Image (cartoon, rainbow, N blue to C red):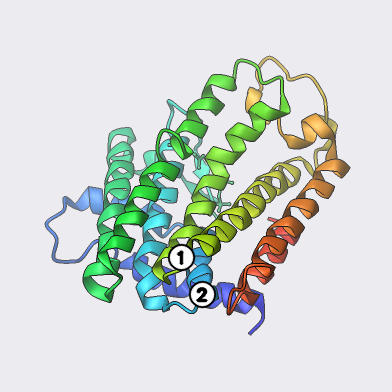
Amino acid sequence: MTIQEYIKVNAELVENELRNALPAGWDVPGPLRDSMQYSLMAGGKRLRPILVLAAAEALGGKKEAAMPVACAIEMIHTYSLIHDDLPAMDNDDYRRGKPTNHKVFGEAMAILAGDALLTHAFYAIVQSSRRFGVPAERALAIVEELSAYAGARGMVGGQAADMLGEQGLTKLEELEYIHTHKTSDLIVFSLRSGGWIAGGNEAQLKALETFGQGIGLAFQIQDDILDLTGDETKLGKPLRSDEKQQKVTYPYFIGLEASRAKVEELTNGAKAAIAGSGFPNAERLIQLADFLMKRDH
Ligand code: GRG
């Protein structure tokens, strides 16, 4: 199976689970259920869940046991996008080519759908233990790590720093803090949680973390590059008064070519961390790192 086929097959498996994320028998108000389902099924790449599955597989773990955590991280990612699109934040009308959640369901319901997805993620993690026999101690570690990587010192902290920085980002380190927490932290969590499910040891979890930090930052720089290509006139140009400071990206600081070189350097470093750590089945992780580096959307 090529890596493209691997991604497609696993994204479909994840989507089948996400379709029934809220059990049909649960007494949930219809519009809330619809609003949650709308964004969960709106066509994301499913990158984070695939990383959970691939990390578990790299250590010889079972896919079924990793699936609830794979779904949990997609719920967190989806909630963050719903809230990020709100008028109080980015005020976006479209995401993935479709009207944003609040445009369809209204602001209040979009906030609640995000809240409910965030909460439901923790329920899903517990199911890996209840339904698939993952030792409770490991599920506990995963819950603890998710609250850190997604919370105030993780993704939410990154979002807050981004918001605060809108008044003027002047240093590359400030941008790196935002990228690390807004983007890399969920990617690192995806990899470590797959490792926990498969019973990885401390050194293996650390290697997955290093791998995640590398591909996470590379992913975000690549995002910055893709955002700019086609409009290279933005490079190093002062912002117009109506433009958001968010446009200050990696290429803005170091230029396009150096940014491309940085993506390659980070990806190679990530692959080296995994290659040197005695994983029984690391092939897919390595291929995923290369795939992400070469992505064009
Ligand atoms: C509102 C708490 C809160 C957090 C928001 C995720 C986020 C933090 C903001 C979205 C804006 C952004 C560019 C974030 C960086 C992370 C990123 C590249 C998200 C997009 O991830 P993909 O490409 O999205 O995996 P798909 O659509 O494929 O799921």
| Residue toward you, 76 or 271 | 271
Q: Nearer the viewer, residue 222 or 66?
A: 66
The answer to whether residue 279 is left or right of residue 23 is: right
Q: Quadrant of the N terminus?
A: bottom right
Quadrant for residue 256, please give it: top right
Residue 158, relative to residue 206: is it above or below?
A: above
Q: Position of residue 116 (x, y in %)?
A: 27, 46
Q: Position of residue 247 (x, y in %)?
A: 68, 30
What whole-number distance in Å separates the C-alpha atoms at marks 2 and 1? Answer: 9 Å
Q: Position of residue 258 (x, y in %)?
A: 86, 42
Rendered image: mark on residue 59? 2
Q: Residue furthest right?
A: 257
Q: Position of residue 162 (x, y in %)?
A: 56, 28
Residue at 40 percent across and 52 percent down: it is: 39
Q: Amino acid at mark 1?
A: Gly
Q: In this figure, which residue is indicated by the disc labeled 1? A: 194
Going by the numbered disc 2, the residue's amino acid type is: Leu
Judge left or right: residue 81 versus residue 26: right
Count residues near mark 1 (Cα–Cα under 10 Å), then give few for <14, some for 14-19, many for 20+. Answer: many
- The answer to whether residue 43 is visible is no
